[in-house]
Image (tube, helix red, strand yellow):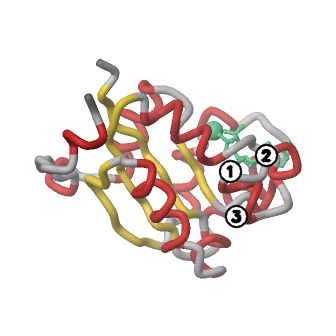
Amino acid sequence: TNYERTFIAIKPDGTERRLVGEIIGRFEKKGFKLVGIKILHPTPEQAAKHYDDLKSKPFFDGLVKYFSSGAVVCMVWEGKDVVKTGRKLIGETNPALSVPGSIRGDLCIEVGRNIIHGSDSTQSANDEITLWFGETEVTNYESPLEKFIYE
Ligand code: DAT
Ligand code: MG
């Protein structure tokens, strides 16, 4: 049924710009379920680990510096196809190519300040959830609303 989890992070610029409520609201209103949340200031080491697959890119050092420059809101969202659909809610990597209606299309301008991260596959979602959350920090709960969201 593709009922799965994804890792979503509001980057330091999103947090500084007071976009936390706006971003959480979009995932909530869509119908996805929040099962893990915390705010922390990542170390450069944590940021580098999170973006390990991009370590050969020319923008890697700047990316690590940006991601570890302030408070990040780390979340786990659950739902049907939430990895892929979450990426659609977010938009393209470059905000300039993101359609209006998407988070990046509506709320930011430059790729180096694109306010939000979302896992790009179920495999990376699992890796990222493990990196940022302890086992007891992600909660399982039943929501009676679900019969209005899923048939
Ligand atoms: P996404 O965040 O959409 O998954 P990604 O995983 O390819 O994109 O890259 C991670 C982040 O790195 C991205 O959100 C912003 C930064 N980045 C990607 N491509 C870039 C580029 N060409 N120049 C500068 N920063 C870039
Ligand atoms: Mg990515």
The residue shown at (47%, 33%) is 83
Residue tagged 1:
102
Residue tagged 2:
99
Q: How far apart are marks 1 and 2 (CA)?
A: 6 Å
Q: How far apart are marks 3 and 2 (CA)?
A: 27 Å
- Residue 63 placement, left or right of 139: right
Q: How crowded is mark 2: few (under 14 residues within 10 Å), some or many (20 or more)?
A: some
Q: Which of marks 3 and 1 is nearer the N terminus?
A: 3
Q: Residues within 10 Å of mark 3 (few under 14, many from 20)?
A: some
Identify residue type, mark 1: Ser
- Residue 104 placement, left or right of 88: right
Identify residue type, mark 3: Lys
Q: Where is residue 62 in the image (x, y as percent from the top left)?
A: 78, 58
Q: Where is residue 15 in the image (x, y as percent from the top left)?
A: 57, 75
Q: Where is residue 94 in the image (x, y as percent from the top left)?
A: 82, 46
Q: How crowded is mark 1: few (under 14 residues within 10 Å), some or many (20 or more)?
A: some
Identify residue type, mark 2: Val
Residue 88, above or below 117: above
**Are circles 1 and 2 on residues that touch, CB within 8 Å?**
yes
Q: How far apart are marks 3 and 1 (CA)?
A: 25 Å
Residue 23, above or below 90: below
Residue tagged 3:
65
